[in-house]
Amino acid sequence: MRIKRNGYLTAGLILTGIIVLMIIIGMFWTPYSPLTMSAKEKLQAPSLRHLMGTDNFGRDIFSRVLKGAGTTLTIAAATILIGSVCGTIVGALTGYFGGVVDDVLMRFNDALTAFPSILLALLVISLVGPGNKYNVILALGIVFIPSYARITRTAFASLRDANYITSARLMGASNARILLVHLLPNTVRILLPALTIGFNNAVLAEASMSFLGIGVTPPDASLGYMLSEAQGMFAAAPWYSICSGLVIILLVFGVGLIGEGLQRGEREVE
């Protein structure tokens, strides 16, 4: 399958690529230590020395944003990995084989999706404990499984009786081969946009949880927790909340453009 590029996809790839490149650089190098405090440089406005200014402890906001964005990106990517892989496996098996297991799992999915995902994540966090990014990944990963299971199940169920699948069965192809070789590649065009939507939802969910103090907490930095810190000093240092929030907006916007481009782009089967 070849996806032709369009304006949305190109703009999204460029914007997201720039942000991700900066985040990767920030994982290994920052202009200042994100934890270093300086009483002499408290609440300084953006300048050449501090591109995004400093906070009430004199910490360089640009360095903290790079580290925090790295944490947010890692959590979102790991969340989507868990949710998409587990959800695809469940959806593929139930959609292809059907039967009682399909009915039971889909009704369970319906029950889970009836609740807001953030509430389910809070429930899982309350069981495993807050403050650890691995617990946040586990909580969000579990919450995202039902949505991907439903999407995959619908795609596989619509294709399981197609002529080429019937021909593959008559030729003696195993169920595993049919699932992996014949069905899965033909559901990519449905799964790719879902991945971009899920990634944005994971970014916003992590930011919301950290903002409320039940996600990532110090010494780890995340964009959501930085926004929580910044709200108390908006009058004295508005650049703190603006810069932290702007990175979230740009990241979500860039990935959203990629998803829109994937949906709008022309697809051709080679």
Image: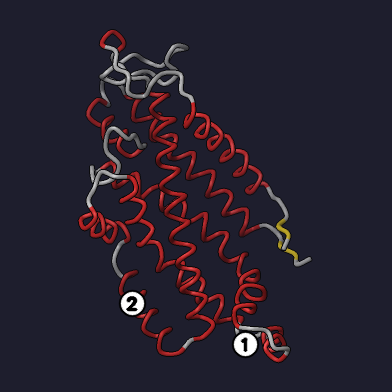
Which quadrant holds residue 38?
top left
| Residue 137 x %, y % | 36, 52
User: Label 2: how many residues lie within 10 Å, few (<14), some (14-19) or many (20+)?
Assistant: few
Q: Nearer the viewer, residue 176 or 212?
A: 176
Residue 184 vertical placement versus 7 (above, below): below
State which quarter of the image contains the C terminus: bottom right
Q: Which residue is mark 2?
A: 108
Identity of the residue drawn at 30% across and 51% down:
135
Three-letter amino acid code at disc 2? Phe
Is residue 115 left or right of 253 when viewed as pictured? left
Identity of the residue drawn at 44% across and 35% down:
247
Q: Which residue is mark 1?
A: 161
Q: Earlier in the sequence, mark 2 or mark 1?
A: 2
Q: Nearer the viewer, residue 11 or 221?
A: 221
Three-letter amino acid code at disc 1? Asp
Is residue 107 left or right of 173 when viewed as pictured? left
Q: Secondary structure at mark 1?
A: loop
